Image: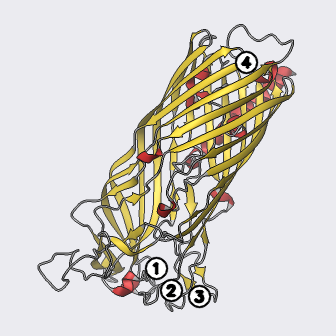
Amino acid sequence: MRRQSKRVLHSLGLLAGAGVLLVAGRASANGFEIPENGTEVMGRGGAWTARADNPLAVGLNPAGLAGQPTAFVVNTNLTYQKQCFSRAGNYASGGNYGGSKFPTGDYEGKPFPTVCKQNGISDVGIVPQLAFNYAVSSKVSIGFAPLWTPSGTGKALWPDGVDRPLTTSDGTPAPPPQRFMLLAKNARIIMPTLGVGAEVLPGLRLGASFQAVMTFFESQVSSQGSQSALQDAAQGPTPAVRSTVKWNQLFTPAFVLGALASPSPEFDIGFMFRWSADIVKKGGEVTLNGPFYGDQGSPATRAVDTTVKFEEFRLPQPWEIRMGVRYHKLRAGVVPPAQGRRDFLKHDVFDVEIDFQYSHNSSFQQITVLFPTDPQCVGLGVNPRDGTALTKCASYVPPDASILKKWQDTLAIRVGGEYVAVPDKLGLRLGGFFQTRGQDPQYLNLDFHPGRMLGFFLGATLRAASFADVSIGYGHIFVETFDNTATGGSLRGLAGTRPDNPDPSDPSIAAPNNYRNACPGQSVPSYRTCTIVNTGKLETGYNMFSIGATFRL
């Protein structure tokens, strides 16, 4: 009977692993992670550095691999993120809306509506983990996580004003106010991880892991295709251009170092350090579609695609360090193993851990996006005779389209623990964390929201068989609201023309500099909109669910 149940549980484990692999393409990352990968880890609020007692230690503290039995773990986090942006102010009057999908312009002068990212079932972030541990001996183990992804949400779809037009209070369609920051994104990162842990001295374990980071990036944003007239400076929708960037970078090196010291049988101290090279894509293409909001019934305003080359896309990767202190009470009358790690459900009464984390996020000052210094033309409209752009050079691609982030270093504290309600059968977990602010709200954007975070978690583990544990977890994370309405934001959208030309009538001034100044009295960087686009309020919250299983072989 036991052999049959073991076969059934192993089959379920293989099916779960296959399911995780099938959703690997949806593994998401937002670059500013939330606690935490792994069902057991999440249920403790991420306070796991000094425990590290299942194969996920290969990515969180590889020293914890040493002394573990041969096993594999399969987990999946489901992350529901609610995010809304309320842009301050009103739609400008006098904008260029003729020939667009918003032909009346009746929305002008009315307040910007609040917009939220799409939150259907298909938008739930799926963050899977699959990891193995092979015990070479009671002192040395090798870990491998073929599927290890950052904890976060990488997919977001915001209103685009075409398929789901916004409406003002009187029902008049209006272009979405967040379009200059984000229309859509789908950032996926998978980090296959190989590591080793060894007990080098009694009570002292060290470990190291290598990660081959694979990045799959896609993003859409709107820009002001032309800013050569005051009606364009008012951000009318007629000259809008949608840019779609999509690229893959299949190798970025990273490593994790770990240490785990046990000065007494009931007291552990853990350390972890992770470093990654910046994710850099050299060379690729961006598809520009304009006029994005054009009336598709007329050739002159029908959208056309233009493909241009970019030179570099760079995503900085901050390093981080953690330290954890753990106390776990040995159950009376239970004899722990002479070698290897203790089995928590079998040998302990409870444990409690506190972790401290420092993240060097100040290295993330901007997302670098560089194009050739010789500006590339952007076409608008469709020539009905050959389908090419009707206007070949309606606007130009900025040589530098980088996005300011100005992140700040962060500190976090995580507290969690577990109580064995039924020895060798059932454990119950609680945890929580607090993390400091990682960005000044004046630079708020919709791709990341690094505000102060406060989270609460709970979970449980059921020993379904002597070789199999099944775990569940839930957590809610509160994120500080970013509101820069009083002081104003600092981000401008991209524009396809320079605003600083002194004399547009001078034929000796070559394009794209031969446009008149549409931002009078303002000091505006080249190829940026006259108007600040991120003044307002950004609100975010998370609900997280997790399910997983560990199988000892």
> How many labels were placed on the picture?
4
Q: Are marks 1 and 2 in contact (CB under 8 Å)?
A: yes
Rounded to the nearest angstrom, the CA distance separating label 1 from label 3 is 15 Å
Q: Which residue is mark 1?
A: 293
Placement of 211 over or under 143, stated as above or below: below
Q: Position of residue 238 (x, y in %)?
A: 41, 83
Disc 3 marks a residue whose amino acid type is: Thr
Front in this rendered view, residue 324 or 214: 324
Rounded to the nearest angstrom, the CA distance separating label 2 from label 4 is 68 Å
Nearest to viewer (mark 3 / mark 4): 4
Q: Are marks 1 and 4 in contact (CB under 8 Å)?
A: no
Front in this rendered view, residue 200 or 362: 362
Disc 4 marks a residue whose amino acid type is: Glu
Q: Which residue is mark 3?
A: 172
Residue at x-position 77% and y-position 42%: 458
Q: Position of residue 159 (x, y in %)?
A: 56, 71
Q: Position of residue 542 (x, y in %)?
A: 67, 54
Residue 102, numbered label: 2
Residue at the limit of the structure toward the front, as seen here:
487
Residue 266, numbered label: 4
Q: Earlier in the sequence, mark 1 or mark 2?
A: 2
Label 1 sits on a secondary structure element that is: loop
Placement of 331 over or under 213, stated as above or below: above
Front in this rendered view, residue 490 or 127: 490
Disc 2 marks a residue whose amino acid type is: Phe
